[in-house]
Every structure is written in structure tokens, then in C-alpha cells.
Image (tube, grey):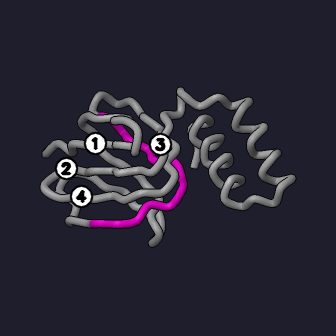
């Protein structure tokens, strides 16, 4: 089986790089699962968790807020405006941000907080 090489980069840092068996991401066209030998693609990411199934059987979940996804020649590039690994997310801070966004009726901030909480919980 061919390897799927993944590079997930945010504006401020390299977030994750390695080999994977599958990646699930949320695009403007809906959720997409990518495995080795997938058809080439270029898409716009929506805010949502990105799930990376690693070759060693592990799972990496990243909260991604906007950006692009590109796949060709078994190389997947995710270029995110903002990206946080699930284990880096401060759940208490994200819950406070969600409550503040709801009270201010800020739909964008509310969505970002919900994505962070979903990633931290390991859910979509």
C-alpha cells in the first residue's frame, strides 16, 4: 500500500507532518476523506476538526479555522489560517470563549470555539 504523506501548516508554524492512512477534513463542499492514491484535489477548508489516522494506528485531531487543502502524488498539504492540535487546546478557555461569543452574538467566534471544543473532545 502506498504511503500518504501529510503536511499540516498554519500561518505561524508547522503543526504536524508525517505518514497517514487517512485524513478527514471539512471543505466548503462537505467532509472529505483522503487516502493514498486519491484523485488530485484542491479545496477550501471550512472551520472544523481535521482527523489524521497515522500509520502506527494513532489518531491526531486538529482544530482548523480556514485555509486550503491540496492533494497530488500521495502528498496532502493542509494550509490553515489557524490550527491547534487537540492536546494543545485549553478546554476551560475555549468554553469561556464560547459563552462570550454567544452573549455577543458573534457567530464566527462561536463557531471557532465550538470547533476547538470538538477537537479537544475528539469528535466532529
Q: Nearer the viewer, residue 57 or 8?
A: 8
Residue receiving disc 4: 71
| SS under mark 3 | strand
Residue 4, image x, y percentages: 21, 45
What's the distance in space between the residues labelled 4 and 3, CA to CA? 18 Å
| SS under mark 2 | strand
Chain-order first, disc 2 or disc 3: 2
Residue 7 is marked as: 1
Q: Specify the quadrant that holds the N terminus.
A: top left
Residue 114, image x, y percentages: 67, 48
Q: Which residue lies at the image location 52% right of the left edge and 44% below the top edge?
A: 63
Residue 83 is marked as: 3
What's the distance in space between the residues labelled 4 and 2, CA to CA? 6 Å
Q: Nearer the viewer, mark 4 or mark 3?
A: 3
Q: Which residue lies at the image location 28% right of the left edge and 39% below the top edge?
A: 20
User: Dot 1, crowdedness within 10 Å: few (<14), some or many (≥20)?
Assistant: some
Residue 112 is marked as: none
Chain-order first, disc 1 or disc 2: 1
Mark 4 vs 2: CB contact within 8 A:
yes
Mark 1 vs 4: CB contact within 8 A:
no
Amino acid at each position: 500500500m502506498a504511503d500518504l504523506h501529510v503536511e499540516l501548516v498554519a500561518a505561524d508554524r508547522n503543526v504536524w507532518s508525517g505518514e497517514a492512512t487517512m485524513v478527514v477534513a471539512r471543505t466548503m463542499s462537505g467532509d472529505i476523506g483522503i487516502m493514498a492514491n486519491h484523485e488530485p484535489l484542491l479545496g477550501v477548508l471550512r472551520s472544523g476538526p481535521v482527523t489524521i489516522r497515522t500509520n502506527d494506528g494513532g489518531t491526531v485531531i486538529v482544530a482548523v479555522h480556514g485555509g486550503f487543502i491540496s492533494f497530488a502524488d500521495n502528498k496532502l498539504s493542509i494550509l490553515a489560517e489557524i490550527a491547534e492540535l487537540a492536546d494543545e487546546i485549553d478546554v476551560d478557555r475555549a468554553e469561556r470563549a464560547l459563552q462570550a461569543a454567544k452573549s455577543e452574538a458573534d457567530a464566527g467566534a462561536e463557531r471557532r470555539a465550538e470547533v476547538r471544543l470538538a477537537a479537544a473532545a475528539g469528535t466532529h
